[in-house]
Every structure is written in C-alpha cells, then in structure tokens.
Amino acid sequence: MADMLKFVERPQSYPAKRVAADRAEDFREIAERYATPAAEDQAGRCSQCGVPYCSVHCPLHNHIPDWLRLTAEGRLREAYELSNSTSTMPEICGRICPQDRLCEGNCVIEFSGHGAVTIGSVEKFITDTAWEEGWVEPLVAGPARGQSVGVIGAGPAGLSAAEYLRGHGYEVHVYDRHDRAGGLLTYGIPGFKLEKPVVMRRVDRLKDGGIVFHEGFEVGRDATLDELRARHDALLIATGVYKARAIEVAGNELNGVVAALDYLTASNRKSFGDHVPAFEDGSLNAAGRNVVVIGGGDTAMDCVRTAIRQGAKSVKCLYRRDRANMPGSQREVANAEEEGVEFVWLSAPASFAGSDGKVTAVRANKMRLGAPDASGRRAPEVDPGAAEDMPADLVIKALGFDAEELPKLWGAAELGVTRWGTVLVDSKTLMTSLDGVFAAGDIVRGASLVVWAIRDGRDVAATMHQYLKAQAKAAKVAA
C-alpha cells in the first residue's frame, strides 16, 4: 500500500485539454492520455476503500481500486488484464462513460473535498497502452459447438454479446443496417469524444476472431425475423432505441428542423470521408448558420460541440430546467462553454417560425421550476409573458429516443413489447415472447449509457449460453 493513499498530498489532475480555440477546429479528442508517471501518480491517490463505492456504482462493477493499485505500482499489464476481465472495451468506457455521475461521482475522496480519483482517464491510459504494447490478445473461439447465434444490432451490446458467445464456441453472425459496425459508437458519438479508429480496431478484432458481420442488412427488408430464426439456433435483439422523440410545437415540419441522430450521423460519415448528400447540400451542416439545439442531455452536448466545429455562426442550447437539474455531464457543459456555446437555461421552444418552408427563428418560452414531479425533480412550467425570439436556420432536436415499432418493421406481430414499445423480456432468462429469441432490452437511451449496453451484452450472452447448452443436450437425448 506504499504507493497508495496519496490524495492529501497529491492534487487531482486530469490529462491536459487542448486550447478551446484549437480543438474547435477539428474532431480530434480534446485531451491526450497521461504520460506513464502521471497515470501512476493519479492512480496512487486512491484510498483503497473497504467498500469501494466506485465499483458499486459502476454498471460493470469493475475492480477499480485493484487496477488503480496495480497502475500505481507500475504493473500496467496486470492492471489491463484485470480491467479487461469485466469489460469488453475498457478504453471506450474510459472515454465516454459518464464518470462524474458514476464511479468518480461516488468516489469517497471526492466527498472529502480532495477531488475524485481520475478513474476514466486512468482506464483509458491502461488499455491504450495495452494496444500499443501488444497485450490485447486476439479473440479465440472456444471448441466448436455446432450451433449458431444471430445478433441483430452491431452496437455496444451486440458487439459485447457476440464476443462472449464466440468465446464459448458458437458461430456468430451480426446483422446491422449501417455500413459499419459500432452503432452509436461509430455514428452517434463525435470524434472529439471517441475517435473512430478506437472503435474500428475493436470491430476488426471481432472479425479476425471469426464473427461474421452482415453490414447494410435491414431486418424486415433483407429478411424477416422468422427467416433469421430459421438460420440460427438463437437470436439476440440488440438494437437499442433510435427513434427521435417528437416535439409537438407549431413549425415542427419546417425544413431545417432536424433530429439529433440524423445530424450526428451525417457529421460522422463525413469524418470517414463518405459522400453525404444531406451534408453537402447544407441540410445537415451547421457551417455559417445560427444553430439552436433543444435538450440538456449528452446528445445535445454532442450536437452543440459538433456545430461549433462545423463553423456555425452562433450556437445556442435551450434547456427547460436550470443548470443544476440538467441530465447531461457537467464536464461536457463546461467543454461546450469553453468552445463558444451559449446556454439558455429555463427555456423551452413554443414554436418555430419560417419563411418559404424553411425555419428562421425559434420562439422560446421562459420557464420556472414548480412543484416536484413523480421522480422528485421540480417540474418546469411556463413563466407567462416572458417569451423570447431568437434567430435559427438550423434547429436540432436532442430530446432523447423512443423505441421503433419492431414487430411492424420486422413482420413479427407476435413479438411482445412493453407499453413503451421496448421489447418485452423475461427478467430472469432475457427471452422474448418468441422461443430462442433474446433481447438486450431498452439499453441505449443515449451515447453516455454505453456502459449499460456492454454489461447487458455480457449478461444476455450468459443466459443464451445456458439456453443453447440445454437445447443441445435435449437434442442429444432425443437422438
């Protein structure tokens, strides 16, 4: 323990961020990783709690104090192996998990006023070092079982489950409607938070391990759900939720009022060098425009910071509550403010005005916080007579996501859904209303929740493994 418990004499220090004016000119990540001595020093601040709240509040229940201690002692390969034992993509979690609401937000030394251990930055450092040093081992399939699994969705849950299932010896096929795997990791999260080579090397590792990817494949168009069931011994639905939540105000149909994910996907495709007509004709390009983003979550932060990098004339973010009650990361708000975003707190759109079918302005109601709602948060209500008009020729709706109508899209009326439209699963087996069809559930409401997707991929893979073993045993007995 000689290298630990240094939080009193050693101040908290995150990796230095690039100057805001410089980082707003490109889509590179805004901070480099630690140099080795700095990572060891910061890891050594850990107090090695008997009950580690950081691990308790981590959705993956990572062994955080243990790999911090190994890092502080310079045992980086062991630290990586321990970190990797509970997460299929720790360097991605280290970059985009909302640590300020999870592990770091519940760090005991944060409560004591000394500043949390910089867990996410150390996690990123450990695994980036592992890739450079060749410690990340290839995916090796287990002994062949003669059974196959189809995974619908190549986002974090689908990729994680595919990796575990391949390790158990199953033939695994992943189907995704996009032309690249990764889901929100690839097309939803901007490069300044998660550079795309970081994602692609993970996907390449899975492909090299024998997982077959069917990209550009839409269930319902290229095959029905029943046809996929006939191809495989089991199916996993890992599609997440992608339908943009609507806003019911006048002018919503005007050109220039767009969904956040459409906007972010277009930007990320351009970063790959793709031909994106909607970007090139200006529909999904903020260059030279007055941009208003509606919402206060991490997706909204991704949109405002992307607009800055695209050369927007002005960027405003409207949120109906105050700063203290916003759902997004406070670090992301601070980064956005440094880069030139203006936040308009306690403000919500009343209508969109337009000319010749194109949006030209947003009329925003001033809001105030009233009595607490069912969740305990003070509910926003309109402050009468305090509306404000602001110019806007690009309005981006970042209000969250709802589930798509999968039974209708996939021609599978018998697939059960909840009252929210998410796939209905048995809480213990994670199986849907269809035998052999499992679901990761409603796991991705935003990019910042990728950790839940990874955890759920692991858990659903375990339940599928038990099911498939039972099926194989039954078939052997019948023979």
Image: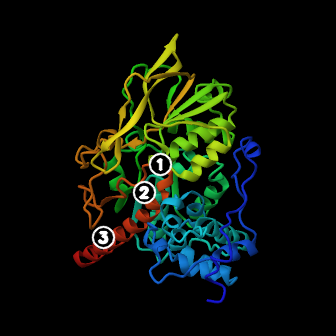
Q: Are marks 1 and 2 in contact (CB under 8 Å)?
A: no
Question: Which three-letter amino acid code belongs to the residue tagged 2?
Answer: Val
**Local crowd size for mark 3, using a 10 Å CA cut-off: few (<14), some (14–19), many (≥20):** some
**Residue under circle 2?**
151
Residue farthest bottom in this picture: 2
**Residue under circle 3?**
467
**Relative to 455, is 468 on the left or the right?**
left
**Relative to 220, is 477 on the left or the right?**
left
Percent of width and height locating residue 213: 52, 55
Percent of width and height locating residue 324: 47, 48
Q: Nearer the viewer, residue 187 or 221?
A: 187
Instruction: Determine whether 196 is above or below 321 in the image.
Output: below
Secondary structure found at label 2: strand
User: Which residue shows up at 59% across the image and 65% down it?
Assistant: 120
**Local crowd size for mark 1, using a 10 Å CA cut-off: few (<14), some (14–19), many (≥20):** few
Residue 270 at least partly seen:
yes
Q: Nearer the viewer, residue 367 or 38?
A: 367
Residue 216 at least partly seen:
no
**Residue under circle 1?**
324
Question: Which three-letter amino acid code belongs to the residue tagged 3?
Answer: Tyr
Question: Which three-letter amino acid code belongs to the residue tagged 1?
Answer: Ala
